[in-house]
Amino acid sequence: MAYENIKTKNRDGILWLTIGRPKVLNALNDQTITEIGSAFANARNDDSVRAVIVTGSGDKAFVAGADINELAKMTPIVGKFTSEKGQSVFLQIERFPKVVIAAINGFALGGGCELAMACHIRIASDRAQLGLPEVSLGIIPGYGGTQRMTRLLGKARAFELICSGDRISAMDAEKIGLVNKVVPPEQLIAAAEEMARKIMVRSPMAVRAAIEAINSGSDMPFEEGQVLESTLFGLLCASEDMREGMAAFLEKRQPKFPGK
Ligand code: COA
């Protein structure tokens, strides 16, 4: 599919996915959500993609939310379908079997904050601001934000941020664990790439299993999560990656993981 609202480029194994609607601060309209879903679906089984970095075009916004021009016209039925579609695309990102990093280059509000939360790791420019301002528009976050923020930060922070609609700085977001790292704007791309490459040299099979254990396990009772963990652990013992990782350690060399 030819994309109108996003750009994708594979640079040495990292798929850079850039939301490209700078005139509306990269707001997510229906077409953009479709394109993001399609890009992740294509990248899922593309072995040349080893990690994804999501960012926004321009220097002002990552994504300033769902497109309010579209939201303003929604009927209840369209509203429900729109929410379900965004939820399903963002779940696809969260469950993506290779690491997904958000490089937050500016405003990450509403759907933009929800998109960032669906990524596995968030690195922000010190100029970025994050928040879920939906209550100031008479709605609530509809792309998984009420659920993901509560799981990421706990109920106390989620109540405060979602019910106030406040925007917070990247530095405050780092303090509460909403972003992993804050860097000056000119270092953002390099910092996101460094994080991706650090993970890309690890075993792809192990990283995939870790993503599944963290994602699925965090929605299970502890003991069931441990069952999942031991099952994935056992499965990895059948992988070529495991044999290579152990052999490389014992032979005092760097591993070359086949990803099988
Ligand atoms: N949907 C549609 N258009 C949006 C948008 C959104 N979520 N966010 C920004 N835009 C548009 C603005 O309408 C404006 O368009 P215009 O140039 O035709 O007037 C353009 O992007 C630039 O935004 P502007 O508001 O002029 O920039 P600013 O620097 O003064 O403020 C924000 C930046 C992000 C604080 C402000 O745009 C904002 O509050 N946006 C909405 C955030 C939001 O509520 N998101 C949740 C939606 S559910």
Image (cartoon, grey):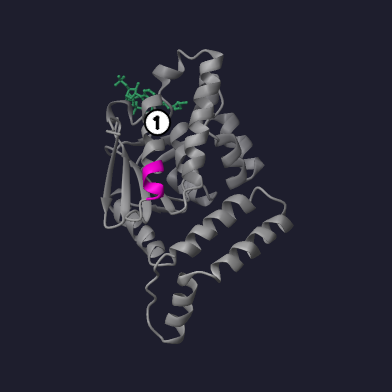
Residue 104 shows in the view: no
Q: Residue furthest bottom?
A: 251
Query: Which quarter of the frame holds ligand 1?
Result: top left
In the image, residue 42 lies in the stretch drawn in magenta: yes
- Give neighbour class at mark 1: few <14, some 14-19, many 20+ (Cα, 10 Å): some
Say whether residue 160 is left or right of residue 173: right
Which amino acid type is shown beneath numbered disc 1?
Thr
Viewer-nearest residue: 175 or 13 = 13
Where in the figure is residue 247, as x and y percent of width and height? 45, 82
In what quadrant of the picture does the C terminus appear?
bottom left
Left or right? Give the position of 231 relative to 16.
right
The image quadrant where one finds the N terminus is: top left
Q: Main secondary structure of the magenta part?
A: helix
Residue 176's x, y, as percent? 55, 49
**Horizontal and vertical percent position of residue 11:** 26, 53
Residue 229 vertical position relative to residue 185 in the rendered view, above or below: below
Residue underneath mark 1: 34
Name the residue located 38 percent from the left edge and 62 percent from the top edge.
200
For the image, the number of numbered tags is: 1
Residue shown at the point (56%, 26%) measured from the top left: 140
Say if 31 sits above or below 41 in the image.
above
Q: Can you see residue 91?
A: yes
Q: Is residue 141 above or below residue 182?
A: above
Q: Which residue does the image show at 42% across and 64% down from the upper left?
A: 259
Element under label 1? helix
Res. 253 image quadrant: bottom left
Q: Which residues are magenta?
A: 41-45
From the viewer's perspective, is 115 left or right of 146?
left
Give residue 19's position: percent from left, percent from top.
33, 36
